[in-house]
Image (cartoon, rainbow, N blue to C red):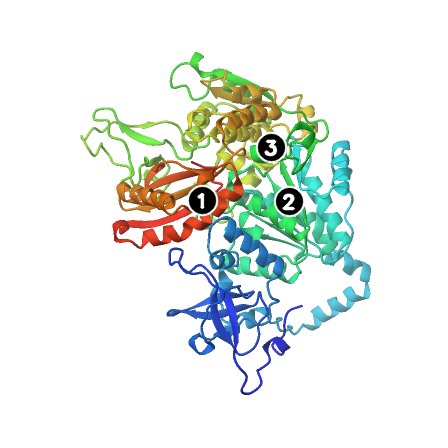
Amino acid sequence: MPLSPDSPLFSPPPEGSTPCLVQVAVHTPVHSGVGGLLSYTCATPLLPGTLVRVPLGTRELLGVVWEQAEQAEALAPEQLKPVRSVLQGLPPLSASWRRLVGFAAQYYQRSLGEIALTALPPALKDMTAEQLAKRLAPPKPKKLSKKAQAALAAEQATPTAHAEASGAVTTECIALSAEQQSVCVQMDQHPGPFLLYGATGSGKTEVYLQRVQQALEADPQAQALVMVPEINLTPQLLSRFTARFAPLFGPQAVVSMHSGMTNPQRLKNWLAGHSGQARVLLGTRMAVFASLPGLKVIVVDEEHDPSYKQQEGARYSARDLALWRGRAEGAQVILGSATPSLESWHASEPESSGGPGRYLRLHMPSRIGAAELPRVRLVDMRQQPKRTVFSPPLLAAITERVQRGEQALVLLNRRGFAPVLFCADCNWKSDCPHCSAHQVFHKGDRTLRCHHCGFTQRVPHACPECGNPDILPLGKGTEQLEEELARLLRNVQRPDGEPARVGRIDADTTRLKGALEQQLEQVHSGEIDVLVGTQMVAKGHDFRRITLVAAVQPDGALFSSDFRAPERLFCLLMQAAGRAGRDGSYVAAQGSRPEMWVQTHEPEHAVFQALRSHDYPRFAGQQLRERQDAGMPPFAFQALVRADAKTQETAQAFLRAASEAAQQGQLPHLDAVFLFPPIPMAMQRVADVERAQMLIEATDRRALLRFLHAWQPWLHWLRSQPAHKGLVRWLVDVDPQSL
């Protein structure tokens, strides 16, 4: 229950009593070297987890009272600053939440205060005690008109109608398939964690709903956390969970949390979870830190998605923290995917087969109903005329689908019209002046944009170097595909006689609030016949009328320097293929068959051969054997130390000095780790900042973490030396997802 202002916790101290010493976690600057708890005084004892406002320098910050550290500051109370105010009315953050934050800070090599305060809603950080009290105060009852009073009296006189209106009715049970029933039985008999490996369209979401409902009905205080990798997947899943649980537990039982919400919305939903009012919280990676005192079930949907790894600030993995949190709090954890990450697949290998057996793998290979997996057709682009965008067989297949009233999805994971503008006379390219990247040509508003730093300028009328007016776009983007398809299909008619309509969904078309939901509704309603999009529409969406998916120019990922590139390409294509033919009855009524078309110059590549048979186990086995031979994750553990500086020489000099300091200081477990030489990052310069990195590898996770912990003071010390004056920042990335 919320603490009241007259709680004994906040009662005034007896006269002449000594102020109490409290230790508080605050968000100190990352490179200040002040990463631990800070000591303050308070007139009364404060429970750990209490939110307070404290002075730090000239500022006043939000802080979280923590347990007393073993080695507290040896300062007399009169030397310490007092707590300015206590945010009353909120229950203290639980011990389990504080343990989660403490583990994340230790594992990902960040300060405790940074993790703790990042996990709280932004609106809470700037609130005074008075503002929070107003926010928590119940609204004043409005005076009802005579008409409203009569309506209320009539509603109260008919309790059945009132129950139906308020949603207090039971929902109709959905019959499960044999595979779904088998999976649910195994979840009843085993504590988990579980890797739910189910084909696209096999009904994984219904399994999530069943497990959450079972937990909520068994315990009136139980809560569930459901995570999705991207914001654009939230509305569809939120509507399903709300439809299921709002009638059972009230209209406020399901809330969401993601970065696309306003600060007041995030605060409202966070408070609903913290107080226990919300029974289900659905969100993106930030939701893993939500305060849920009754947590019983954690679902990580599309667990393979790299979006679960934070790429700025504290670089945590929400999937891995969800697993740790579930184990620490006794909550059942379900990881779901049609294309699991290789780390999760390896962890779910049973001990009887020589694997770790840390997760229980559950398999649902069949689609719900009569739906079948799409047939994969490879188009060898070496046999097509040069500069062909859509091969004649693919264009004919799309045309046929549109004429039958079906829909097609065209995937190209590159937005804009073209990746670069080029001058054939002097070889000028539209490079970004602030990054080691090209500016992308956007034809719609005639701009060149850098997708890394955001720098934008108008398209020049002629080459800035030689004055040649014929500057040409090189490569393809979704904007160009949309234009090309509209031209090629201009004479194609739908069954109702209307011309074919082409739409596009990518980061450019969904910038405005509500734009994504509106465009998805156009797809669901059949207003769009051919949808062009990036990876944001290739996974998680339940498009019922799409029967054909085409991947254009997927080969680039095959030659990336990142060893995870083939895995990510295979997952993306498998997920995209899963958008086709999800409604078996619709496909049968059309007399159609779902298809996945892939235009490639490398049709013999193992990625495409495994894709043809939808054989993820075969692909995963081959990739894991290669990684084991090369000593790469999940058979080794990695961390990156990155340095950003004004020059590349300064960045690499800092990393070399850090490596030498580790050798000279004979840090613990130095013999168990291997430090690679520093190199420039793949994207070397962003926003006029040069970036370099150094890879650290170990075969023992504990040894790597203990080495990094012992290395931290040296890194802080090195940054303060005059030799590294041009250094902008450094950071440690544990378990990096991109190299």
Residue at the disc numbered 1: 733
Q: Could you tell me the amino acid type at mark 1?
A: Asp
Mark 3 is surrounded, within 10 Å at the Cα level, by few (under 14), some (14 to 19) or many (20 or more) other residues, namely many
User: Is 71 located above or below residue 710 in the figure?
Assistant: below
Q: Mark 3 and mark 2 in contact? Answer it, CB < 8 Å.
A: no
Residue at the disc numbered 3: 346
Secondary-structure class at tag 2: strand
Give residue 650's position: percent from left, percent from top: 27, 44
Q: Quadrant of the N terminus?
A: bottom right
Which mark's residue is nearer the viewer, 2 or 1?
1
Secondary-structure class at tag 1: strand
Q: CA distance from mark 2 to mark 1?
A: 25 Å
Q: Earlier in the sequence, mark 3 or mark 2?
A: 2
Q: Earlier in the sequence, mark 2 or mark 1?
A: 2
446 or 652, which is in the foreground? 652
Q: Earlier in the sequence, mark 3 or mark 1?
A: 3
Residue 647 left/right relative to 565 = left
Residue at the disc numbered 2: 299
Secondary-structure class at tag 3: helix
